[in-house]
Amino acid sequence: MGFEWKVAFRFLKDGRGQTAFILLGIAVGVAVQVFLGTLISGLQADLINNTVGTSAHIIFSGDNGFSAESRQASADYTFAVEGNFRQTDDTLKDWRPLMDALDNQPEMTAVSPLVQGNGFLLRSGISAPVVFRGIMPDRANELYQLEEGLLEGNLGLEGNQIMLGTDLAEEYQLRLGDNVTFQLPGESRQVFTIAGIFDLGSQSINESWILLDLSRAQRLLGLGDDINRLETQIRDVFAADVLSEELEKQFQGVSIDNWKVQNADLLSALQSQSGSSITIQVFVLLAITLGIASVLAVSVVQKSKQIGILKAMGTSSSSASRIFLIQGGLLGLLGSLLGVLFGFMLTQFFLWGTAQATGRALFPLEFDPVSSAVIVAIATTASVVSALIPARKSAKLNPIDVIRG
Amino acid sequence: MLRLGEGEIVLLETRGITKVYGTVFKTTALGGIDLNFDPGEFASIIGYSGSGKTTLLNILGALDRPTDGSVWFNNVEVTAMNDRELAEFRNRNIGFIFQFHHLLPEFTALENVLIPTWIKTHSSTRQKEERARELLELVGLKERINNKATDLSGGQQQRVAIARSLINEPAIILADEPTGNLDSETTEQVYELMREINARLNTAFIVVTHNDHIAAKSDRIVEMKDGMILKDYLTGERSKDDVWQDVAPKYCRHCYKDSDEVNNQLL
């Protein structure tokens, strides 16, 4: 251990109460940072997961006729009026090659075709609005985690078999194997058999979705071989906007939408939440830095006799300033390590507390060692920086001013 | 100018050093000092407060720079060094003993003695630690090696400071009123210790003192007044009574208040 380290360490050790207080101050500040960071990233991860965990990230649908090409085509008609274009059908035609192509994209984790139409469930004189969703069960399972959400029955949808949500089943006292009558678009009625009851974690889905086989839905809704949408999930949810831009260049004649556009409000809310979190962290860091700076500034005055003696005995000015930089660094490092420990304990206590109050943890909180290490590194660096002014004072101290007594 | 043992090497030499404080209202603390100090000599600098003793000592010890003139150590010009070189020069060649001992209270007696070696080499070796123990034994503090500096009496602290000034084996030790804060019995012990070291290690001592006994027993007395050398002589060249008459009544501490009374007693 070098000479400056020895002196710095001894100065800190000797200033017991003062050292303990500033360490505690740093620890409390860092604990707040760690706790706040964990809480907010946990909350955001939970929100994002709820939003996009079991829904489509990028959606392909039929070109609705407002694309540049159709604008160009309509210009051929001399009587066409700007803004009044021919609305083409928004179904996806010839979608199988597109699906195959998307299957081969490495970013895609799920590709699922969808046919959708509205109808009503008819039961003892009451009609409840429902949404028919024709799917390929295997592919839809990858996207919606149907198997996990399935409470009763199985995924094999054949003929007139359907799956419906647990809220709908409960409300109308429907059970597995029951035959139910639905009204389809165009006043036609159809009887289906319940082959499965699911809980997909969202009330609106659980009380409205009716899942049936894709080809059956196509026939019932009169779509031929067309579908309404191709729904996909991708590996990195936050890359959805970038990826969909790339896909737009690759695939023409389809309309591509992504969850980030659809959830712009949520994303901007999350962003401003992160912003305020960072603001708080910056100010906590500032408070820590000022605290260390003031403690060390006092310490330089307290230790000016010692510094003077050391300098008289041949300690160079740079060495004398290093003693205080080391003290700052040691305070920052020890304090922030202690703070990470406190923060971790606070997080656990919070989880335990919410579990006590509500029966289960509100959302999963994951302690992130990387961000904690970053906080420790930043706090330590800031502490060294805050020691710069005291260190300069120490360097400038003239030994003959103090050795005479 | 006075030389001990004509033809020997000069250890420390000042050439016309002056020290002027202030820029608008100038105060001259030193008005052109030429002095030579030889290896192994034991010199006292005496004079009233404000006569420039401490200013001279600080410049001799490379703690301060003269306004004009130069300081030479073993034929090297100290006054030409930059601050960093000065610090290293002090660490290697000069030992300091102060009136208020100036040990670091955070460290033990042994550690305080070792501090100059830490500054020198940025580490401490077993040999150095052994040497520090020997020095503490030499100053009679074998039993107090691991005491914190604050747990030692004034005399003990000053002995630790003496051991500390010796650890880097300097050629010269500068002492600014080393016994100024000690009772008469301890003063005698500290003086004897300095003489013993002076004899055994041939370390030169320059002692600024108000203590008449120490001054009278030195090999050489340099008397200052108003920033100039008033007298500079070897005590061996005069009779003891002569030296005592010259030194005693004027500069002993307690004489300040009622020097007439003391003078009367002596007469």
Image (cartoon, coloured by chain):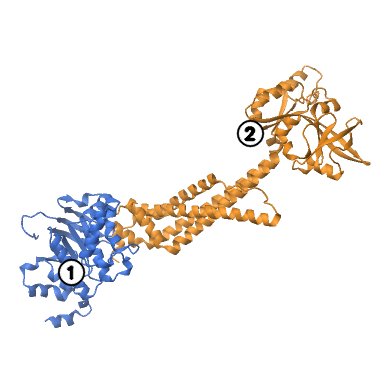
Residue B257: image x %, image y %? 23, 79
Residue, disc 1: B191
> How many labels sit on residues?
2
Q: Are marks 2 and 1 in contact (CB under 8 Å)?
A: no
Tint of chain B: blue
What amino acid type is highlighted by mark number 2? Arg
Q: Which SS class for mark 1?
A: helix
Picture quadrant where residue A58 is located: top right
Host chain of mark 2: A
Residue, disc 2: A235
User: Closest to the observer: A7 or A273?
Assistant: A7
CA distance for labels 2 and 1? 85 Å
Label ID, residue B128: none
Residue A170: image x %, image y %? 84, 45
Host chain of mark 1: B
Name the residue at 20% across, 75% down.
B185
Chain identifier, colour orange: A
In which quadrant of the rendered image does the C terminus of chain A lie? bottom left
User: Closest to the observer: A214 or B95?
Assistant: A214
Above or below residue B218? Residue B37 is above
Residue B83: image x %, image y %? 27, 51
Picture quadrant where residue B211 is located: bottom left
Name the residue at 24% across, 61% down.
B133
